[in-house]
């Protein structure tokens, strides 16, 4: 990756020089910055998704700093390359703590998210004067806001249970869906989707037949043709997949090459690389459940968000601005620091509990019980007929099918949180 203008440290030494020049300046010269450690894969099979995260966080931090920062201080994004490993992430966490970083963020992989929750809990118990908050923008295992909930963890993405609730509510109304195939990555996120998809469909549409349920290794499959052959022979009408990164891009690319005629219900088909891999054959077939896609900015006449979509796209093409929850995370963090009048993690965590934030897509609320963000969600389809923005220069854009109000996305939590 490119040089990150002085911020890429030994933690990301393995990232190539070529990618770094594309990342915005992140206040690297200021001594009194508010540092946020970004712990995600910057090398390996998911490096492109990690790179998108670095660019998105850096760009949004740049905007906050240009608007005066937070309590007179700039935000500094400090990337760490965890190589997709939970063990490496814990080492990154230690390095962040040693460097006086009080906020870490991560999203790519619930196997990492679970390790970070445990790591932050242990660190904060041992170091009450050097606490850390974990801001989670995409690790969606429901356990993190249920039995594994933590006062020091805040999740800004809808969890897998919430997204599966929305997907199965929609599928239950489509009478032409008779057979469903589930294919997911073999770790906690994918395993939950497999389990919840079967349970929720059985409850809402017992006539739907589950004709396949496959878990495959995370980030290791190079050829999905055998899986596509299995889906094709099953007679499935629809596929549900929580895959992300290359695991999704290669899956749908193999499906297009084989002429697989199904609707894909996905969590992450809007992420970097997937639209290009999908191609024209995906038109009208690939759907996402998400808090945002670019054409929603047009639907809502959201001027600031439209400007972000366009300036980010101009700077980082073919990357698109697709992860609004990163903006929500940073905006809520800024609001909590201003409310607390401090950057102290305990004061900020208390301020963030129960906080509501008006976004261009609607009101988002950080539920105090379990620190799960409750926000509107949308089902959208990749189409040749879109309002303004295509995805990654493909000539296909996302079109909203339905909006699910925030209160209808929420699911109950079993969290019994211990508070300091």
Image (spheres, grey):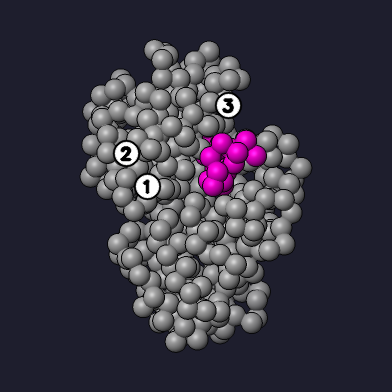
Mark sitting earlier along the chain (1/2): 2
- Label 2 crowd (10 A; few <14 / some 14-19 / many >=20): many
Give the Cα separation between the discs numbered 1 and 2: 9 Å
Question: In the picture provided, is 57 more to the left or to the right than 382?
Answer: left
Judging depth in this view, the residue of 223 and 204 nearest the camera is: 223
x then y, percent, for residue 78: 38, 29
x then y, percent, for residue 257: 48, 74
> Residue sitting at 40 percent across and 29 percent down?
4
Mark sitting earlier along the chain (3/2): 2
Residue annotated with mark 3: 63
Find numbered disc 1 in the image and state the secondary structure of the residue it sits on.
helix
Indicate which label's residue lies in the foreground, 3 or 2: 2
Residue 102 visible in the snapshot = no
Q: Is residue 59 above or below residue 207?
A: above
- Label 1 crowd (10 A; few <14 / some 14-19 / many >=20): many
Residue annotated with mark 1: 47
Give the image quarter of residue 263: bottom right
- Label 3 crowd (10 A; few <14 / some 14-19 / many >=20): few
Q: Main SS type for the magenta part? A: helix
Residue annotated with mark 2: 15
* Span highlighted in magenta in the image: 310-330
Indicate which label's residue lies in the foreground, 1 or 3: 1
Give the image quarter of residue 385: bottom right
x then y, percent, for residue 291: 59, 50
Q: Is residue 335 above or below residue 231?
A: above
Q: How many marks?
A: 3
> Residue sitting at 67 percent across and 50 percent down?
389
Disc 1, disc 2: CB below 8 Å? yes
Whether the magenta-drawn stretch holds residue 324 is answered as yes
> Residue sitting at 40 percent across and 58 percent down?
246
Find numbered disc 3 in the image and state the secondary structure of the residue it sits on.
helix
Give the Cα separation between the discs numbered 3 and 2: 25 Å
């Amino acid at each position: 990756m490119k040089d990150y203008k002085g911020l890429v440290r030994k933690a990301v030494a393995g990232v190539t020089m070529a990618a770094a020049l594309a990342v915005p300046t992140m206040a690297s010269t200021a001594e009194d910055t508010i540092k946020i450690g970004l712990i995600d894969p910057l090398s390996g099979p998911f490096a492109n998704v990690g790179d998108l995260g670095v660019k998105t966080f850096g760009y949004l931090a740049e905007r906050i700093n240009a608007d005066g920062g937070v309590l007179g201080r700039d935000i500094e994004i400090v990337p760490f390359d965890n190589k997709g490993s939970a063990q490496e992430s814990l080492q990154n966490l230690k390095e962040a703590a040693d460097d006086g970083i009080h906020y870490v963020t991560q999203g790519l992989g619930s196997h990492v998210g679970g390790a970070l929750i445990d790591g932050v809990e242990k660190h904060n118990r041992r170091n009450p004067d050097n606490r850390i908050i974990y801001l989670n923008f995409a690790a969606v295992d429901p356990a993190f806001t249920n039995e594994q909930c933590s006062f020091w963890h805040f999740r800004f993405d809808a969890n897998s249970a919430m997204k599966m609730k929305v997907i199965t509510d929609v599928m239950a109304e489509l009478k032409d869906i008779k057979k469903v195939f589930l294919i997911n990555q073999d770790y906690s996120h994918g395993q939950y989707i497999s389990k919840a998809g079967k349970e929720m469909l059985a409850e809402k549409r017992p006539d739907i037949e589950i004709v396949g349920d496959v878990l495959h290794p995370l980030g290791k499959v190079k050829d999905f043709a055998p899986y596509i052959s299995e889906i094709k022979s099953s007679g499935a009408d629809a596929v549900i997949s929580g895959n992300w990164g290359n695991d999704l891009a290669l899956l749908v690319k193999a499906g297009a090459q084989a002429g697989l005629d199904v609707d894909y219900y996905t969590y992450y088909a809007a992420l970097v690389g997937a639209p290009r891999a999908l191609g024209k054959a995906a038109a009208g077939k690939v759907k996402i459940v998400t808090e945002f896609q670019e054409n929603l900015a047009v639907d809502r006449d959201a001027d600031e968000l439209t400007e972000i979509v366009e300036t980010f796209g101009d700077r980082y093409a073919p990357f698109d601005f697709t992860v609004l929850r990163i903006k929500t995370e940073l905006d809520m963090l800024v609001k909590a620091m201003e409310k607390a009048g401090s950057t102290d993690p305990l004061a900020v965590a208390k301020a963030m509990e129960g906080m509501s934030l008006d976004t261009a897509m609607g009101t988002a609320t950080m539920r105090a019980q379990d620190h799960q963000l409750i926000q509107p969600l949308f089902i959208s389809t990749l189409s040749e007929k879109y309002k303004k923005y295509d995805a990654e220069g493909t000539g296909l854009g996302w079109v909203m099918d339905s909006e699910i109000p925030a209160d209808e996305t929420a699911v109950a939590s079993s969290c019994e949180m211990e508070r300091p």
